[in-house]
Image (cartoon, rainbow, N blue to C red):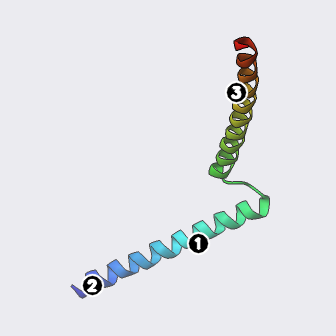
Amino acid sequence: MVLGFILYETFDLVYNFGALTYNGTKYMYKWYYGIENETIVKEKEIEMLRLRIKFLEETLLTDRSSEYHKKAE
């Protein structure tokens, strides 16, 4: 029973230490070489698309509403 506990805790420590080392190394590599995360790039692209849609909607609504009022008169 004690041996199982020692083995379990040893495996847990080795796994967590390895994960921390791997993730830390990966972060430092990406930071040093300026590699951006894919989710950040996608979020920026989505934000640019939202702004473009907003601009197009405002332009479209402004143009059509003025045309509609001219035709109604």
Rendered view: 9 above or below 56: below
Give the mark, 2 or 3, whose residue is nearer the N terminus. Answer: 2
Disc ID at residue 21: 1
To which quarter of the image does residue 3 belong?
bottom left
Q: Residue at x 58, y 72 (%)?
A: 21
10 Å crowding of disc 3: few (<14), some (14-19), many (20+)? few
Disc ID at residue 3: 2
Estimate the x, y position of residue 48 in percent, counting from the top left: 72, 41
To which quarter of the image does residue 33 belong?
bottom right
Which element type, helix, strand or loop, lies under badge 2?
A: helix
Of circles 2 and 1, the one toward us is 1
How far is mark 2 from mark 3, CA to CA? 73 Å
Quadrant holding the C terminus: top right
* Residue kind at label 2, given as amino acid type: Leu
Residue under label 3: 61
Of circles 2 and 3, the one toward us is 3
Drawn side of residue 34 relative to residue 41, left or right: right
| Front one among 38 and 33 | 38
* Residue kind at label 3, given as amino acid type: Leu
Estimate the x, y position of residue 64 in percent, counting from the top left: 72, 21
* Residue kind at label 1, given as amino acid type: Thr
10 Å crowding of disc 2: few (<14), some (14-19), many (20+)? few
